[in-house]
Image (spheres, helix red, strand yellow):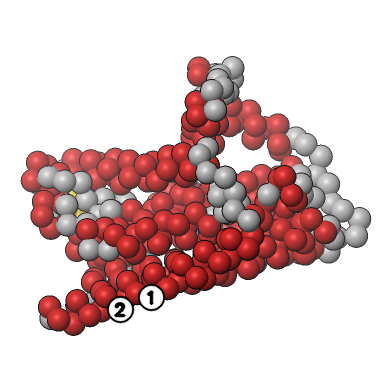
Amino acid sequence: MDWNNPLTHSVLVIVAITVAFLSIMLLVAATVLAERRVLAFIQGRVGPNRVGYGGVLQPFADFIKTMVKEDLVPDHSTRFVFMLAPMIAVITAIMAIVVYPFGPTITLPFTNWSFPLVIARFDVALLYVLGVTSVGVYGIALAGWSSNNKYSLMGGLRSAAQMISYELSLGLSLVGVILISGTLDIYTIVEQQSGWYGMNWNIIYQPVGFLVYLISAIAETNRVPFDLPEAETELVAGFHTEYSSIKFLLFFNAEYINMITVSMLATTLFLGGWNVPFAESLFGRGTLLLGLFSVVGFFAKIIFFLFLYIWIRGTLPRFRFDQLMDFGWKVLVPVAIFNILVTATVMFLIQ
């Protein structure tokens, strides 16, 4: 098959994007159900268990219920921006998915067809991810402003301050990985972690950077204990107080898609991506079995991070806003800069 043929390439890209989108949507539904069941277990409750076997169809029932609710728009809102904000939030969350490699280059059996398990690969993929995800703050900030609601406005302002602050520490936490890898190509970074029988993960060299990234990512996705923009006990529901029906659903999905994408980034940069210990030795390089096993390993690591998100939500209390900002600027940023200095010094000495 001629992969360089423009028509063939376009069809394959459309198919790959469709499969990736559907997979992410199913993973969002599974994450919502898992969060409700795990939180119920932590809090001594039962959780959803009526719709489908073990409550497995509950997310789809909630989806239908939300879709048929009345779509309200406040009288004095800025209508166009009010409708645009949730679209910005969910589109920017989804756009980052296309550059994450979920498996190595494989060759189909009995053919010479080889292709990498990634939708789009380019030299500055990491910059693309950081650039696209940083635009998501506009969705939340515009939602708070356009609603003409004081609680929503406060949630939007909190979000702008929080996401801009923690984006700085998140970006700095990745510099150590970039210094070690010498590239911004996510696919190459994952390939470089395939040594030591698939165990040469960057978390070994960047434990501090990983910890800073993990904390910053939780704050970036507005999750407990950093969920100040939507603090129900203070702001009713924060920036999405006035949203209902499909527009509320878009914000809801954007939060969970962002959880998945930052988990993907943590997996690819720090936990070896698709690399599973001894998998290449067992199945052989480039084989279909290796590709399938690698995809399973990749998603298993993502599920671990999602479980960590849920566990933290059921365990830790919310920060005060001043504590949130102090922790970002006075702790995470200095630690991230110190980590960069140490990493750069070590790389200079060993080269």
Amino acid under label 1? Ile
Quarter of the image where the N terminus is located: bottom left
Q: Is residue 189 left or right of residue 163?
A: left
Q: Residue furthest right?
A: 75
Dividing the picture into quadrants, the one containing residue 65 is top right
Q: Is residue 203 left or right of residue 120?
A: left
Crowding at dot 2, Cα within 10 Å, few <14 / some 14-19 / many 20+, comes out as few
Q: Residue at 37% x, 58% y: name it.
A: 211
Q: Is residue 335 left or right of residue 131?
A: left
Dividing the picture into quadrants, the one containing residue 141 is bottom right
Residue topped by disc 2: 341
Q: Residue at 91% x, 55% y: name it.
A: 75
Quarter of the image where the C terminus is located: bottom left
SS for tag 2?
helix
Amino acid under label 2? Leu
Dot 1 and dot 2 residues touching (CB under 8 Å)? yes
Q: Residue at 19% x, 76% y: name it.
A: 346
Q: Is residue 339 visible?
A: yes
Front in this rendered view, residue 192 or 11: 192
Residue topped by disc 1: 337
SS for tag 1?
helix
